[in-house]
Amino acid sequence: MASTASRPFVAFLSDYGHADEFVGVCKGVIASIAPDAHVVDLVHDLPPHSVAAGGLALVRAVQYLPEGALVIAVVDPGVGTDRRLVAVECEGGTFFGPDNGLLAPAVAMLGGARRVVELTDDRWHLPAPGPTFAGRDVLAPALAHHATGVAFEDLGRVVDPAGLTPGLVGLPRLVPGGAVEAEVWWIDRFGNCQLNLGPDELEELGGEPGGRVEVRAGDVVRAARWVHTYADAHSSELVLVVDSYGLCSLAYDRRSAAAELGLRTGAAVTLVPPGASVEPTG
């Protein structure tokens, strides 16, 4: 996170989408309690119920937020159950969200949790007509009250940071023969496919900028050239680039790699560098 904001800075991430009033209502709750807060939308069109996608979007964004930012993150398929709602204080900011792994990658990015409270004190909540809108009834008002000066420890019951639910972040897997199986972590609106693989890991296996890597996605096999940027791709050429977050990404110039390769978030992709092979299975 960067420099301190001059007024409370709130970042909002959710899977609410924009077809309903949910995002606007939560922002209205924050404004009614903390009118000086500056609320910025990170993303609301995440795949519904995908805690992993939300966690990855949050960890990509959090390093660019102002020092001391307050973050409300809501991807909560367990809403209304006994899963906890928490506030997590880190050195660079404070997160409000469900304790389901959503917050864990971003908390780790900021050096880990210093203090955690379960949001159990209903003085800082709205009356809830039903249990299924915790973003409106618990998270938004608790964050807003904290922004106006309610002490962190007064938001609820202090809990052990070690008990936070960890994030489920997949790691690349070496394949016999010198190849590596990666996972599609993120597909942006252009169809570029970010992998959970850094360029250093690929170079250790024999890949190199300017060279080619075989890409296997299900029954699809393509050769990808490792280029500097999207515009370096020739027409209809699959390329591998290091994206703006420092990870390997599969792309076409002005075309969707996800559509061309039949990929979705969470799909497995095998990269076979020069000199490596994939042993037959079965």
Image (cartoon, rainbow, N blue to C red):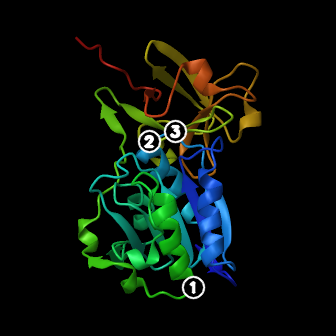
Q: Is residue 218 left or right of residue 163?
A: right
Q: CA distance from mark 1 to mark 3?
A: 32 Å
Q: Nearer the viewer, residue 112 or 146?
A: 146
Residue in the picture at 30% in, 57% down: 166
Numbered mark located on residue 49 in the image: 2
Residue in the picture at 56% in, 81% down: 147
Q: CA distance from mark 2 to mark 3?
A: 6 Å
Q: Is residue 59 left or right of residue 164?
A: right
Residue 101 image point, x, y percent? 35, 55
**Quadrant hosting residue 234:** top right
Q: Nearer the viewer, mark 1 or mark 2?
A: 1
Q: Nearer the viewer, residue 134 or 266?
A: 134
Can you say which quadrant of the picture contains the N terminus?
bottom right
Q: Secondary structure at mark 3?
A: loop
Residue 164 seen from this side: yes
Residue in the picture at 63% in, 44% down: 20
Q: Earlier in the sequence, mark 1 or mark 3?
A: 3
Residue 173 image point, x, y percent? 32, 37
Label 3 packing within 10 angstroms: few (<14), some (14-19), many (20+): some
Q: Are marks 2 and 3 in contact (CB under 8 Å)?
A: yes
